[in-house]
Amino acid sequence: MHFAVAAGSDVGRVRKGNEDSFFADANEYRGLFMVADGMGGHAAGEVASQMAVEVVSVDLERLKDLESADALEMVSLALRHANRAVFERSAAERDKMGMGSTASVLVLGDERFIIGHLGDSRIYLFRDGELRQITHDHSVVQEQIDAGLITRDAAKNHKQSNVITRCVGMGWDVEPDITDGEVRQGDVFLLASDGLTGMVDDWRLQQLLGSRATPDRLVDAMISEANARGGVDNITVVVVRVHSSSAMATGAHPTNPGAGSIG
């Protein structure tokens, strides 16, 4: 598989620190991409998101064949392992009490993708001119939308818009959402923390992803637009564009929060 990837993270215009983390890496077998949005006082959110990224990326180094019978379970176990690690550290260190993180993971192979998800960071697929949100937010607001109690427009300004119902570190065990699908030439995947999706509407993201801009320019444009609309939270974006589904491309590298774009 040949693809182009870029990633970036920005503190935004309101927060003093960046509690987001991201990962983007590829080898001859698969690509691995992840966004994690931490929460907790005294920089504990930053610790939680970094731990989530580190645990999941190490665990999934062993995943080479996305067609194998246990591939989906490996992604689920990696997220559950991260959850246990964050939860145990939260319980052991007083200043880390209650810390947690979202986690949205994309594993990309020659013909298949696998997604693992906890929280409200999102993964989208742009295909044939249309944008589809693949992940389903684990949040109080999303539950109310699902129940028909509020509209999506009303959800944007809801007082509980930042309350999530499932995350890494929430308890001793957690059940992540796991899904998979076919990879096609021309697909564009977007991974983002809510610092982007809470500020920039899906229709605008679809416009941007439908342009001919390179992934690094898309990342910069999305971060700039989120900041222009207020930048009330940390903003993290990963864009992966699939050029063909032959041999896996290499050249992307793991990155740290705020490290800027890669491509």
Image: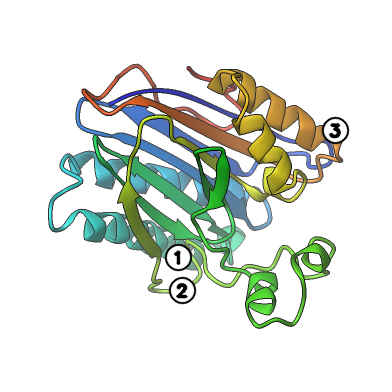
Q: Secondary structure at mark 2?
A: loop
Q: Element under label 1?
A: helix
**Residue 106 spot, x, y in % from top left:** 39, 44
3 vs 2, front mark: 3
Residue drawn at 17 percent across, 39 percent down: 64
Q: Residues within 10 Å of mark 3 (few under 14, many from 20)?
A: few
Residue 137: image x %, image y %? 58, 63
Residue 125 vertical placement versus 259 (above, below): below
- In depth, the one of 250 and 164 nearer the eye is 250
Depth order, front residue of 183/83 = 183
Against 176, residue 116 (above or below) is above
Could you say which disc has been placed on residue 171 in the image? 2
Residue 172 image position (x, y, % from top left): 40, 74
Quick one: label 2, few (<14), some, or many (20+) residues within 10 Å?
A: some
Residue that mark 1 sits on = 87
- Left or right of residue 43: residue 15: right
Kind of element beneath mark 3: helix
Do the CB atoms of the residues marked 1 and 2 lie less than 8 Å apart? yes
How busy is the neighbourhood of tag 1: few (under 14 within 10 Å), some, or many (20 plus)?
A: many
**Which quadrant of the structure image shows residue 158?**
bottom right
Residue that sits furthest to the left in the current view: 68
| Identity, as a three-letter code, of the amino acid under mark 3 | Ala
The disc label shown at residue 228, or none: 3
Which residue is depicted at the point 25% across and 39% down? Answer: 111
First in sequence: mark 1 vs mark 2: 1
Up/down of 186 relative to 51, above or below: above
First-in-chain label (3 vs 2): 2
Q: CA distance from mark 1 to mark 2?
A: 6 Å
Instruction: Give the camera-side residue of 69 and 101.
Output: 69
